[in-house]
Amino acid sequence: MSIEVAGTAEAKAEGPLKLAVPRGALLGGTLDVLDAAGVDTAAVRGESRALIFPGEEITLVTMRPSDVPTYVESGAADVGITGKDVLLEQSDRMVYELLDLDYGRCRMVLAGRKGDERLGESQRRLGLMRIATKYPRIAERYFESTGRQVETIEVKGSIELAPLIGLADGIVDLVATGRTLEDNDLEVREEIVECTARFVANRVAHKLRAAEIDGLMGRLREATSG
Amino acid sequence: MIHPIPPGTRDILPDEMRELRRLHRSLIEAFESRGYGEVATPAIEYDEVLARGDGRAAGSAYRFFDERGDLLALRSDMTVPIARLVASRYADAEKPLRFCYLANAFRAVRPQRGQMREFAQAGVELIGAPAPQGTVEVVEVLEAALDAAGLDRAVIGLGDADLYRQLLAELQVEGEPRDAILTRLEMHDLVGVEEELKRAGIGDEQVATCVALSQLRGGREVLERAREIGGDAVERAIARLGETFEALEARGVAGRVQLDLGLLRHLGYYSGAILEVYDPALGHVLGGGGRYDGLLERFGVDLPAAGFALYLERVHIAQMEEESRRGGPA
């Protein structure tokens, strides 16, 4: 459904729509969905190490998934695709979440060592669990909402290491297949939230480039449904 | 030696100040020439008084005690202080009243360019003039202000604050589920809106209706599209918006107005028409406003009212971006 914009607003939009594309685990799925939606992704798939791929209708800008809300909030990118985990962790970034793209499905979980009762024991005897995570805000919100106190320890590298050598009682992390947990003798204790890729837009772009964004959104919806 | 200042505050140095003053003067002149007299109110007020105006936002992020132990707060906007001023000093004056201001306000936001915790606003309040004529006058003044600032590409979004409240009442969604849905709508989290509506037991068809409605923005044809979606609440909102839009057209000021059924503002006191201002050169909203026909009553004088405020730092950024787009200072 495309919608015309009032007055002269439509004529004021300039250049192709800038779409922030997440590199990393979401990249493959994102490019497939964009192809299905009729957006040319050949250049991104090539060998080029460029970050910006200009197109006639849409310019693709590749970046870390966690940078997508930053670029879209400021309007440096008009629209973007990133994981719900990133949006939850950066919930103070004002972006419009327009569509669940239904790929890149994974779970945010609380995990601990197999057969190890450290999580429960720390909670019961010390009143505080130590949780290592790359998602401190999601973790804090989750434990607060379930009435438990935690110390969140933010780590940047392999989270799995933390409970294995005694930095933390457990971890809050994103799990796709569970292989990494399995390999490190960890198991899922609680599921916090399920995450998929989402289509987001800058507030002002959503108003001033309504027809283009609605058009792309419609095509993405078709490409991901069914 | 470097002496720190609190996060979200900043010093303004002469080059910037000179440009800001130029902007201040042109805006105040635009307001004054339309009969809006400038007022100033204290930056600190009693917390209780501010909270009376906007219970949901519960006043300010900055609160402290004075030497008598009274709880004071820094204002988070100028609309509530002016409502307080009108109730205290103009209760019996002839209406409508027209005031303008240029003042700093304070909010606990994540500091970034154009979004500081202490920020300057310029705006007007039109008190005692009901919809639609009062709304139309405010939009006219807003357009004059944008012209005075040289932002000829700016667009004004016009929506209706009561639409979703009434729509949800029609669907018999109340209390916590209703607030959750309104919060998602205000953030324009469409995935969340859908989830919350389903959780509240709304059928698929009506969920799709709500989501589609919140996506409608554009010219007059938006009202037709909304009418096809149907329902009493939608019909009433369309009637209000249509009436306002027609009055704007009659005054020849509808050209830069975009009808927007997805618009919701986070402040609790809005009712009826709501406004937002955008410029294509800037990713942030330049300002906003609308009607708050119930606000003055909370201060003991039952008067319809409307107004808007522009974030001056953002207007200044937009001016600079527009200049560099046109190729150098105008």
Image (tube, coloured by chain):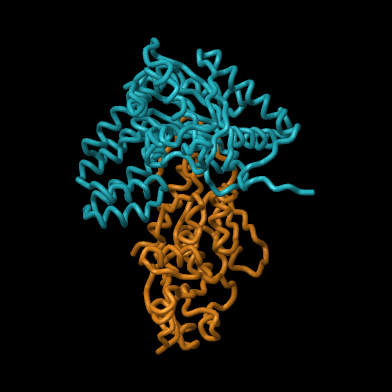
Number of numbered tags placed on the structure image: 0
Q: Nearer the viewer, residue B272 or B100?
A: B100
Q: Residue B328 falls in which quadrant of the image? A: top right
Q: Residue furthest top?
A: B94
Residue B278 in the image, given as x and y percentages of width and height? 52, 36
Chain B pictured colour: cyan
Which residue is pictured at 41% across the width and 38% down the height?
Answer: B267
Q: Is residue A43 above or below residue A113?
A: above
Q: Residue A223 falls in which quadrant of the image? A: bottom left
Q: Residue furthest right?
A: B1
Q: Residue A176 falls in which quadrant of the image? A: bottom left
Residue A178 in the image, given as x and y percentages of width and height? 44, 81
Q: Is residue B276 above or below residue A181?
A: above
Residue A109 in the image, given as x and y percentages of width and height? 42, 74
Which residue is pictured at 67% across the width and 45% down the height?
Answer: B5
Location of the C terminus of chain A (image quadrant): bottom left
Residue A35 seen from this side: no
Q: Is residue A20 above or below residue A191?
A: above
Q: Nearer the viewer, residue A35 or B233?
A: B233
Residue B90 seen from this side: yes
Chain A pictured colour: orange
Residue A98 in the image, given as x and y percentages of width and height? 42, 52
Q: Nearer the viewer, residue A168 or B252?
A: A168
